[in-house]
């Protein structure tokens, strides 16, 4: 039986402000538990929230980057629910009047299996609204033998807690500013959902509104999944909560889709629920029934005035935006002659695009070879060493200098690879490495002609065979010449001279 998969994402992006969304408490990660849980974050009596201007500007940036509508008037609401890590019993969020309205993000999808080709797809963004984060429950502490009332975390920090309790509540994160980005249910496979999440992750880092650190919880995804028969209304969705890995997202969606299909085909019924993914078992499990909006009893927060955003403010923020990935891609294709694929890969992160442009500054006119090296050798070596672009041990200027020596014929491609390996391991500039290792190509046409004459004279029988029509022997002569020159003969010159000499 054929089934259609329907997927939508809600992405919680922690904004890169130094202080919380409604108070001056620090948002720094890794502080001792509960040392940044100020009075406003936990709503002690008599305190009032004050909106962080930086959080609003980051929301505006996102809206502009996705072509979304920026609401000039939006409202904060209280979302009422009780969890141990939300001590005031409600979350300040936005509901029917969010700061960012409808927008879109175009993604490049790499199918996860089969022979399908990559393709582009536009995912609609329903809204993006500002809200405060909750704290977190921390499980798995061990009792400190020195005191029955102290819990010891894995990092060695201590939390005072009642005796025999093995769960800690850390409220440092409470009040941290979030931008929740909600998509339309436009994705129909795990591959599309992962591509969208990666594109969003890259974009928020590109425009500087989020550090994107998934391990620290700065970028967390909730995935809504349902299945239906073709042409039928949307099925009942289940929401997979708090995915902080693209790999886990793909695994969770694949499992959840198959579970829903099996449940329906076996006569069961999918119930709307919030589920968790267990990476150890590769399975999802229901955590609680899924609430709808009315269950949260939203109402405007009486302590916060409506947020007013003027046209001038929007334009000021627009002026701070960097060149966006899609605009760079178009420029790379039109101005530099790169393929759409190369342009897409080079703009997959701002760090890679900046590295490419800086390297190109030292390798003028060598856009294609520069792109090939960054996408190929540089990226492969980064992957082998477990590094990202920001940690690359070779500077863009060093790579650009090496590429210029390939372009002007000083070194061959094989020589360049040796220069690259030396740079990576030991550092240094290309010219110094070329000189120290004796890697300069022989580009003296007279010297190459003399070498070719010797080879032709020593292999008269092979020359006769070549001239009788055995063209494949050309590689044989190239091999002899490169061996005789110890790999230093300029390949292009060598090929030209060989062809002329062998032609008689």
Image (cartoon, rainbow, N blue to C red):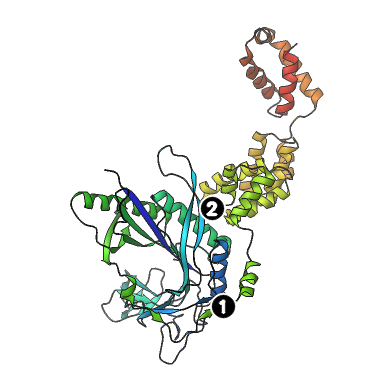
Depth check, front residue: 167 or 486: 167
Which residue is painted at 59% across and 52% down in the image? 347
Disc 1 target residue = 53
Can residue 393 be seen in the rendering of this structure? no
SS category of the residue bearing label 2: loop
The N terminus, quarter of image: top left
379 relative position to 484: left or right: left
> Measured from the top left, where is residue 65 in percent x and y?
57, 62
For the residues bearing labels 2 and 1, Cβ distance under 8 angstroms: no
How would you rate the neighbour count of disc 2 (Cα within 10 Å): few for under 14, some for 14-19, many for 20 or more? few
Q: Is residue 417 above or below residue 383?
A: above
Q: Quadrant of residue 478?
A: top right
Lower sequence index among marks 2 and 1: 1
SS category of the residue bearing label 1: helix
Depth check, front residue: 409 or 201: 201
The label number, if any, that marks residue 323 in the structure image: none
Disc 2 target residue = 387
Depth check, front residue: 121 or 467: 121
> Measured from the top left, where is residue 361 in percent x and y?
72, 50
Labels in figure, total? 2
Could you give the CA–CA distance between mark 2 and mark 1, rounded to whole angstroms?
35 Å
Q: Nearer the viewer, mark 2 or mark 1?
A: 1
How would you rate the neighbour count of disc 1 (Cα within 10 Å): few for under 14, some for 14-19, many for 20 or more? few
Q: Quadrant of residue 112?
A: top left
Q: Residue furthest right?
A: 446
């Amino acid at each position: 039986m054929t089934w259609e998969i329907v997927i939508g994402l809600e992405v919680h992006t922690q904004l890169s402000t130094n202080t919380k969304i409604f108070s001056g408490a620090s948002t720094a990660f890794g502080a001792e538990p509960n040392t940044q849980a100020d009075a406003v974050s936990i709503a002690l009596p008599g305190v009032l929230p004050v909106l962080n201007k930086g959080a609003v500007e980051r929301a505006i940036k996102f809206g502009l980057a996705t072509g979304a509508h920026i609401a000039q008037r939006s409202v904060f609401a209280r979302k009422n629910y009780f969890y141990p890590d939300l001590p005031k019993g409600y979350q300040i969020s936005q509901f029917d009047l969010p700061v960012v309205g409808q927008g879109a993000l175009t993604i490049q999808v790499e199918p996860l299996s089969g022979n399908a080709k990559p393709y582009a797809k536009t995912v609609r963004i329903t809204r993006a609204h500002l809200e405060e984060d909750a704290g977190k429950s921390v499980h798995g502490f061990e009792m400190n033998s020195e005191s029955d009332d102290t819990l010891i975390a894995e990092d060695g920090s201590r939390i005072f807690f009642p005796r025999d309790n093995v769960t800690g509540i850390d409220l440092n994160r409470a009040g941290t500013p979030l931008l929740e980005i909600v998509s339309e249910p436009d994705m129909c496979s795990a591959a599309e959902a992962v591509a969208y999440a990666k594109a969003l992750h890259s974009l928020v880092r590109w425009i500087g509104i989020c550090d994107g650190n998934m391990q620290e919880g700065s970028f967390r995804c909730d995935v809504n999944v349902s299945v239906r028969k073709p042409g039928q209304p949307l099925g009942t969705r289940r929401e997979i909560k708090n995915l902080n890995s693209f790999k886990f997202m793909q695994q969770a969606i694949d499992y959840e889709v198959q579970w829903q299909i099996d449940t329906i085909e076996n006569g069961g019924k999918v119930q709307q629920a919030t589920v968790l993914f267990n990476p150890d078992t590769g399975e999802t499990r229901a955590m609680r029934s899924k609430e709808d909006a009315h269950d949260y009893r939203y109402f405007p927060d009486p302590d916060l005035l409506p947020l007013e955003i003027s046209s001038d403010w929007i334009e000021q923020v627009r002026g701070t935006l960097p060149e966006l990935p899609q605009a760079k891609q178009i420029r790379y294709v039109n101005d530099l002659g790169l393929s759409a694929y190369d342009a897409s890969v080079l703009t997959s992160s701002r760090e890679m695009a900046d590295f490419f442009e800086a390297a190109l500054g030292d390798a003028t006119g060598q856009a294609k070879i520069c792109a090939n090296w960054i996408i190929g050798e540089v990226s492969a070596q980064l992957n082998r060493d477990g590094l990202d672009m920001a940690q690359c041990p070779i500077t863009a200027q060093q790579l650009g200098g090496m590429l210029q020596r390939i372009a002007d014929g000083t070194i061959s491609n094989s020589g360049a690879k040796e220069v690259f390996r030396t740079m990576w391991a030991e550092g240094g500039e290309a010219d110094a490495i070329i000189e120290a290792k004796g890697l300069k190509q022989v580009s003296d046409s007279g010297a190459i002609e003399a070498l070719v004459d010797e080879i032709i004279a020593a292999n008269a029988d092979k020359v006769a065979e070549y001239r009788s029509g055995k063209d494949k022997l050309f590689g044989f002569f190239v091999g002899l010449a490169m061996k005789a020159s110890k790999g230093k003969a300029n390949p292009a010159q060598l090929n030209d001279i060989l062809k002329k000499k062998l032609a008689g």
